[in-house]
Amino acid sequence: MNNADFRSLRIGSTMALMGALLLPGCAGSGHVVPPGPIVNGSAAPSTSSRATATFKITIPKATASAQSRSVKYVSPATTQVVIDIQQGGASIGAPYPETVALAPTSTGCSSTLAGTQCQLGVTLAPGSYSFFLTAEDASGTALSAAAGVPFTITPGVANQITVSLGGIPTSVAVVPGAQSALAGSAGSGYSLSRCTSSPQSINVIGVDADTNYILGAGAPTASLTSGGLTVAAAGSTAPNAFTVNVPNSPATAESTSLSANVAYNTGSGVQNVSATIPVTISSDICGQVTTLQTSGDQLYGLAFDASGNLIIATGNHYVDKLTPAGVFSHFAGTGVAGHADESSGTPTTATFNNPRGIAVDRNNNIFVTDTFNDTIRKIDTSGNVTTFAGTAGTSGSHDAQGASATFNFPWGIVADTVGNLYVADASSNKIRKIDSSGNVTTIAGTGVPGSANGSGLSATLNFPTGITIDPFGNLFVVDGGTGNVRKIDTSGNVTTIAAAVSGFALSIAIDPNGTLYVTLTQGPNFNPGIIKVLQSGTFSDIAGGPNGCQSGCNIQDGFGLGASFGAPAGLLVGPGFKLYVADDQQGSVRIVQ
């Protein structure tokens, strides 16, 4: 553990640099390599893939002039300790666990005014470990339960850890276990994903005025509590170890804290040293799939209106509505393919032809990509249906005003906060912008299918189907032809965030954390599901996918890869941090949370 890491984990403590003496035979590899020279507070860089660490164990002695640091816990019978170094919950192997003698005459030990100090050096591969110590008497009888201290081996720095077998705690160290997913530090606070399923290990350790961890027989009694997390003690065999579980609900972000305490007996009563560490539980979509409602229609794009109704484009020539009460209805369209507008406020008499995308603007107007008609339709708040851009029966990619513009198989559509619409014009291999007056312009794509990045009109796209927007105005597009996830920033630059995340993708959504979700639609060599894509480019199956449903089987609710989909074709992150999925083949709206 380097100094910077140690300071970030300790409350009110710092770590002192020291030179290294050695106890033979204590290296993780079975031999000892002396630590490198100290250079400006850190060790000289290693020339191999392994690094050194130094451990200092102190047995303090009481003095009349140092009452505040007098020994309170160390057993007079302590003559040796058993040391184990573990990784991933298991010992790293020979020579560990190893018994080390603690006496001024022992190898690597010396007598000082403060007591007996023993130092040992080990050589380990970089990574996360735990150092366990058990105090014993001369007969090998354990005087203390094993107490663990996580540490990290980092090449090129002075990896050090200091331990005392007695002393007065002046602060509390709260240290995540070596394999813990807790991020951050005790000083600034920890963060933890809502999706963390396994218990997270965390250690509470008393620290003396000399910044030593206090371990061994009679060490301060550690406790850990929380108002928002479930905390459990690991047991009597590991008195300073605890586990923390994250609640599954609510899905939104939540702030809580950990309260750590070490108690010690002064002879005249029990004293406590405490610390409170803030913890943020991040909002997240973890993969629990449930079926909200089934309509029987072929469902595609989704959007919420101002009343909380889910508006859905269907392959049955309808625009459907699902109310918050779970009632499905045909909101617009007759169910017969056509292209008839409606000006009397009765949208169920208008006709559509296989609409695929839905967007709701800031004024609660609904816009529909009438895909097989190559037009963009508008349903206003009075129920009137008009053709906002494009001409039915005329395909192309001509930029112009309203009906003079042309589209070629427009699919996804999204509205920004200032009245503009953005359309994934699939067969044109372009992204089109429509302003509030109906002016259509191309903002990305040359028209030639491809995956070239670049500024707007010099970049190429390949059958873009899904499109979404973040709060800053950046657009995210999934290329149906390649499964690539693309970003178009506010300056018009096109980049690829992640390549080939899906065999054939139809939709993309973004959550408030900036995480993207892409549909994996049914195909001959893959199963349908939902993929989570981080903007760093990392992606993974979150639901369905490898273990999902193929043609002819029933959909199944469940968690993660245990759930199955028919053909997810629409995605939307809605209220309560839930991912709404339009499952085309089954005609169902599914929720992933």
Image: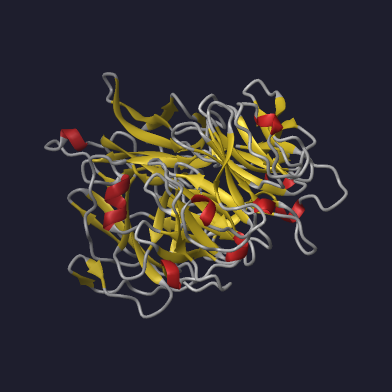
Can residue 518 be seen by looking at this rendering? no
Name the residue nearer the viewer: 398 or 230: 398
Name the residue nearer the viewer: 58 or 450: 450
Residue at the bottom extreme of this rendering: 47
Q: Position of residue 199 (x, y in %)?
A: 55, 39
Q: Position of residue 362 (x, y in %)?
A: 44, 35
Q: Is residue 441 left or right of residue 326?
A: left
Name the residue nearer the viewer: 394 or 247: 394
Q: Is residue 546 left or right of residue 205?
A: right
Q: Is residue 592 left or right of residue 17?
A: right
Q: Residue at x 23, y 61 (%)?
A: 18
What is the quadrant of residue 206 in the picture? top left
Identify the image quadrant of the N terminus. bottom left
Can residue 354 be seen by looking at this rendering? yes
Name the residue nearer the viewer: 416 or 354: 354
Q: Is residue 442 left or right of residue 109?
A: right
Image coloring type: secondary structure
Q: Position of residue 578 (x, y in %)?
A: 57, 35
Q: Position of residue 112 (x, y in %)?
A: 20, 54
Q: Residue at x 48, y 60 (%)?
A: 399
What is the quadrant of residue 426 in the picture? bottom right
Numbered circles on residues, count: 0
